[in-house]
Amino acid sequence: MNKSKQVNITYEEISTWSEYLACGDLMQYPDKAKVTDGCSPWFTPDNPCGGEYTDFNSCCVQHDYCYRTWGISRSTCDGNFDSCLTNVCVQAVEMGEGTVEVACCISSATTYYVMVITFGSEPYENAQLEYCVCCQ
């Protein structure tokens, strides 16, 4: 005999960071579209060095998704971003990218990482608020 139990769940939109923190284990990632702007093109282009193998877009997209996923800390997202950027530059070397482009890649990767650890707190909190709800 199959017994089922009906459970009523209500979702509450959260609007402040303190409300978000108060939800604790009652958070659930809602089914919302994951939209990304890549490397925020108005001040950090996807491929700042113009090389064939120096494109950071996939790293930026992954970082955007990470910020919008509940349960992953900001430091984890930023660390993964740093690793991804570094891997792009390593791959550029392995693929025979020019010396100027590789030097630019390494410098740009460092700059992009410093930017997210310096200015990423508010975007992280805003993404968590926008893409997470309390499940009660």
Image: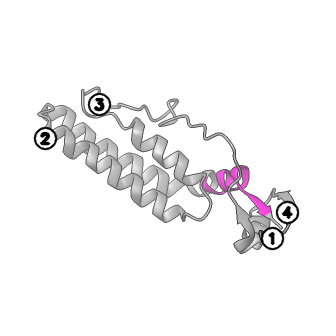
* 50 or 61, nearer to the observer: 61
What residue is disc 1 on? 3
Indicate which label's residue lies in the foreground, 3 or 2: 2
Instruction: Give the secondary structure at mark 2.
Output: helix
Query: Is the residue 73 above or below the residue 29 in the image?
Result: below
The image quarter in which residue 73 lies: bottom right
**Which label's residue is closer to the chain start, 2 or 4?**
4
Amino acid tagged 3: Cys
Amino acid tagged 2: Glu
* Identity of the residue drawn at 48% across and 64% down: 75
Q: Quadrant of the C terminus?
A: bottom right
| Residue 69 point in image, percent of width and height | 59, 55
**Which label's residue is closer to the chain start, 3 or 1?**
1
Label 3 Cα crowd, 10 Å radius (few <14 / some 14-19 / many 20+): many
Q: Looking at the rendered structure, which numbered label has been put on residue 94?
A: 2
Q: Is residue 33 left or right of residue 112?
A: right
Of all residues shown, which one is farthest toward the front? 1
Indicate which label's residue lies in the foreground, 4 or 3: 4
| Residue 112 point in image, percent of width and height | 40, 46
Distance between mark 3 and mark 1 Cα atoms: 61 Å
Indicate which label's residue lies in the foreground, 3 or 1: 1
Q: Is residue 96 left or right of residue 54?
A: left
Magenta-tinted stretch: 124-134
Distance between mark 2 and mark 4 Cα atoms: 52 Å
What residue is disc 4 on? 9
Instruction: Give the secondary structure at mark 4.
Output: loop
| Residue 114 point in image, percent of width and height | 42, 53
